[in-house]
């Protein structure tokens, strides 16, 4: 029986790619990976901050497949392989489905789904035995999401993709899992809460997770560290909910 080593939590020498790493969860995940010894490569449509020491650190829109191809080639040239890929970039706007244009819908589909398949397609040739793909979805992939119908549907599609790819890639020793966050205050998350609270919809999001407090971006990083490395070597095709219990609670809301 293989012993569990404290080193198992480290990512020493592993090559980790994180998308959407300029701020929020992506930045926290990339910084944690670097702290735990990984070589980190990042991209974001905003300029990724230099504090992580990522190489390459490219400014690009993940929906732009030509730019993603250039990024993948830069990763290959610098590191020669990819051990961890975190598809974190994503986002939405708040609007009733009836008010969402065809163009707006297409944006949500590309922003939350097809850019992920594109990134995986470009980086999979660099991945081998022991590699880990982590797709950042949302608790809204698992529940009704008025005002976010297409976004939630695309995150649900990403959960489905996660399970199917886990099976397809298992023979190659590549694990595929999802992190479904909620209530982790970031610029993106706060903007959404403000929009909903302006009364655009006849519903409002959960204010207080069952744990009785909001989380923080590093909570997503903790889950990503687990799924990326040896501690999760027998974990594939599943979702880690990082939401203070919101998913488990279903319709139940903790009173203030
Ligand atoms: N924070 C939460 O509680 C929460 C809840 C549910 C889902 N999520 C998911 O977690 C992920 C990160 O969210 P966050 O809260 O950190 O949001 P955020 O808006 O604060 O950060 C997202 C980052 O991704 C980048 N990005 C977005 N679209 C991009 C694109 N097309 N090309 C390149 N870069 C792009 C942004 O520039 C930004 O730096 C997203 O996929 C989001 O849907 C977060």
Image (tube, grey):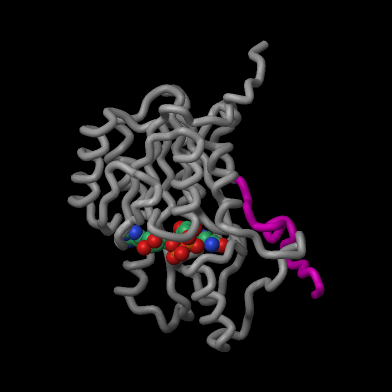
- Residue 223 is one of the magenta-drawn residues: no
Nearest the eye: 26 or 158: 26
Q: Residue at x 57, y 70 (%)?
A: 145
Residue 224 visible in the picture: yes
Q: Residue at x 56, y 51 (%)?
A: 220
| Residue 139 at x, y percent in the picture | 59, 59
* Left or right relative to 141: residue 212: right
Instruction: Residue at the far top: name it.
Output: 1
Instruction: Residue at the far front: name it.
Output: 51
Residue 5: image quadrant is top right
Q: Give the quadrant of the N terminus.
A: top right
Nearest the eye: 4 or 156: 4
Q: Residue at x 52, y 68 (%)?
A: 189
* Image position of 30 with respect to 181: above or below: above
| Residue 195 at x, y percent in the picture | 51, 81
- Residue 247 is one of the magenta-drawn residues: yes
Q: Which residues are magenta?
A: 240-256
Instruction: Residue at the far bottom: name it.
Output: 199
Q: Give the quadrant of the C terminus.
A: bottom right
Q: Residue at x 72, y 64 (%)?
A: 213
* Image position of 139 with respect to 69: above or below: below
> Which quadrant of the frame does ligand 1 lie within?
bottom left
């Amino acid at each position: 029986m293989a012993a569990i080593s404290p080193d198992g939590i480290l990512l020493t020498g592993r090559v980790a790619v994180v998308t959407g790493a300029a701020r929020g969860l992506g930045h926290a995940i990339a910084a944690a990976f670097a702290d735990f010894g990984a070589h980190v490569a990042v991209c974001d449509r905003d300029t990724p901050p230099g504090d992580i020491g990522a190489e390459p650190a490219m400014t690009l829109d993940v929906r732009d497949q030509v730019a993603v191809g250039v990024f993948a080639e830069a990763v290959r040239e610098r590191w020669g392989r990819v051990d961890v890929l975190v598809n974190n970039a994503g986002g939405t706007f708040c609007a009733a489905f009836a008010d969402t244009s065809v163009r707006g819908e297409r944006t949500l589909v590309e922003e939350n789904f097809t850019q992920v398949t594109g990134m995986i397609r470009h980086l999979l040739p660099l991945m081998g035995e022991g590699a880990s793909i982590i797709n950042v979805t949302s608790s809204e992939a698992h529940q009704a999401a008025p005002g976010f119908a297409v976004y939630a549907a695309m995150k649900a599609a990403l959960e489905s993709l996660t399970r199917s790819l886990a099976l397809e890639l298992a023979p190659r020793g590549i694990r595929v899992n999802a992190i479904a966050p909620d209530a982790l205050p970031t610029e993106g998350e706060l903007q959404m809460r403000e929009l909903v609270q302006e009364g655009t919809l006849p519903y409002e999001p959960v204010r207080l997770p069952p744990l009785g407090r909001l989380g923080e971006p590093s909570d997503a990083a903790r889950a990503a560290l687990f799924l990326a490395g040896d501690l999760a070597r027998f974990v594939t095709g599943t979702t880690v909910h990082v939401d203070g219990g919101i998913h488990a609670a279903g319709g139940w809301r903790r009173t203030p």
